[in-house]
Image: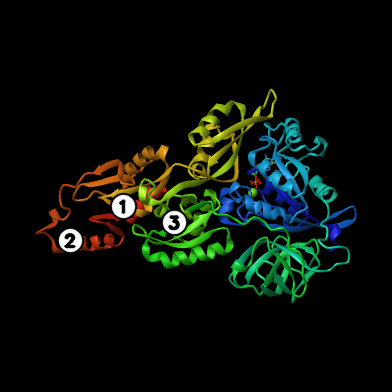
Amino acid sequence: FPSDLIRNFSIIAHIDHGKSTLADRLLELTGTIQKLRKGEQQMLDKLKVERERGITVKAQTASMFHNYMSKRYMLNLIDTPGHVDFSWEVARSLAACQGALLLVDASQGVQAQTLSVFHVAKERGLVIVPILNKGSKIDLPAADPELMAAQMHSTFGVDTSEILQISAKTGKGVESVLEAIIDRIPAPRSAMAEGDKRLKAFLFDSSYDRYRGVISLLSVQSGVMQRGDKIQSIATSKRYEVTDLGIMHPEEVPTTSLREGQVGWMVCSMKDSGEAHVGDTLHRVGETIEPMPGLKATKAMVYAGIFPVDSNDFVKLEESIKRLTLTDRSVTVSRESSSALGQGCRLGFLGTLHMDVFRQRLEDEYDANVIITAPTVPYKVIYKDREVYVSNPTNFPDVTNPTSQVKEVQEPVVNASIIVPEQFFGDMMDLLYNHRAEDMDFRYINVSAKDSRLILTAVMPLSEIVTDFFDKLKSRSSGFASFDYEDAGYKASNLAKIVFLVHNKPVDALALIVHRSAEQAVARTWVKKLQKVIPRQLFEVPIQAAVGKKIIARETLSAIRSDVTAGIYGGHYERKLKHIENQKESKKRMKRFGSVDLPQEAFFDILRS
Ligand code: GDP
Ligand code: MG
């Protein structure tokens, strides 16, 4: 396929603005897929969790062909995830494109993520095709296309005459999108000078197949890749032989080659998925080339321990986690053991949604029954002579102890932005304030009689966002606020570790790192929760929360009066035996804390709530 007839593009949009629906229409209109029946699942959202939650987790690509002005074009759609947790995946998908369709829901207008992805696309020099979706009045009565077009003009600097108005749902105007892709987005240009045929391929995604090994998604920047080619990675210098390649149409279709400008899949003699470095550049053995400018590596922002509900299932759980991380390389894994929960794994995620999705996939696809500890962000502990990152509260030092040698503790912070209608300004400021936001600022992005909206910005601790911030934001703005954030480094903070003691023994899996202004409230809530889930014993059990040596909250679990076996003596032997048998059974699932038995289910309950 000659590269002047190729277009590589993405659709960028805030979640729910219709990206997947538009992708389906484009695939239908070009005959790539059969027309979907009403209510049928979207083509590009392949994972079960993605369909259930209506979000795209892993970016997918699809090639389609379209005849226009008596020429046949190859259009490569590179889908991007639509959630802040995955913004890094957005950046890498966009690196393989020359243009992006910027989709805005006409009834909602520009939202926080529309802005952030727009900036990523702009930085990469992509041509932007602005589109208003759900645009016709018949389609959605609340839509106000004129107002929204004016808003897109003021926020993105696009000419209102360039804005396409479509309905992805009904298909109205989607033909004009195909035309704009061909007319406005430039063909991919060779990364090399005229006549230079050296192979240069950019690896932007990879997945693992048990039978075929590592499958990479590539964008060929120059030259041609064919089966049998000997290739080499710039990142690792390792060499491979290309065994199979092709395009996504929308499933994998083998072809004889992948040429300059094309996007497709490739299988080579790479067996270990750890060798497929996203952002890597591949070239032919014996040739030298300049690498593509690298992408920022993923950074885990949220950590949690995962333990099997039944400790006998650890081996199976670890195996499942390993398999799952082969399809999602942004998850980091290490082993962890806890006196309360036994053997488990400590996982690092891009965000809490990412964590939830991973847990759901473990449960859905691997039938795992797991306990997840409270999420924590990576803290930086600065000693006189060294810095240590702590992503497990158990390893957090007791800062109240003068002999701990800790000079300072820092926590990750983010630049947060919220777009919200003016009437919620007060509620939002209040919410931000309660979540330790600093440097708050705001400006209007839209002023009109009908719709005045603001963008609020602030610097916030990441730990404040990984809890229930998002839910609060939605409820306190009646669903109208949208939110996005980006990494803003580390900042010194007054933090401490709360340790919970059951019958004077610390329960490691429950330790928490909190800001000292919140320690009392948090300690009290958790002590109460524990009192509810821990079964009463034959004696009184104190449940306490401590910071360093100081107890800051306490509840007491009262004793059960009579012995459970008391009523059974002297009576039926068989019943007695059965009772002892039952006790043995439940013993297995108990964890002993000094003299207190804690059922694993209690942890499950408390950590789920
Ligand atoms: P994504 O999160 O950007 O991929 O959004 P989806 O494509 O999943 O669409 C979100 C919701 O909006 C779905 O319920 C779609 O059926 C609906 N939707 C998409 N396009 C249109 C449109 O043009 N008109 C109307 N009324 N609804 C639409
Ligand atoms: Mg979608």
Decide: is 376 above or below 197.
above
Which residue, given by chain and number where applicable, does mark 1 sit on? 506
Look at the numbered disc 1 and give the secondary structure of its residue. Answer: strand
User: Could you tell me if the residues under marks 1 and 3 are in contact, i.e. CB atoms within 8 Å?
Assistant: no
Left or right of 293, for residue 538? left
What amino acid is found at the position of numbered circle 3 in the picture?
Gly
Left or right of 212, for residue 535? left
Tell me the colour scheme of the image.
rainbow
The x, y position of residue 593, in whole percent, is 27, 56
Mark number, residue 208: none
Q: CA distance from mark 1 to mark 3?
A: 17 Å
Q: CA distance from mark 2 to mark 1?
A: 37 Å
What amino acid is found at the position of numbered circle 2 in the picture?
Arg
Asked if the beta carbon under badge 2 is closer than 8 A to the nearest atom of ligand 1, the reply is: no
Which residue, given by chain and number where applicable, does mark 3 sit on? 305
The x, y position of residue 583, in whole percent, is 23, 60
Which residue, given by chain and number where applicable, does mark 2 sit on? 575
Residue at coordinates 41% horizontally, 55% vertically from top-left? 395
Decide: is 539 above or below 232.
above
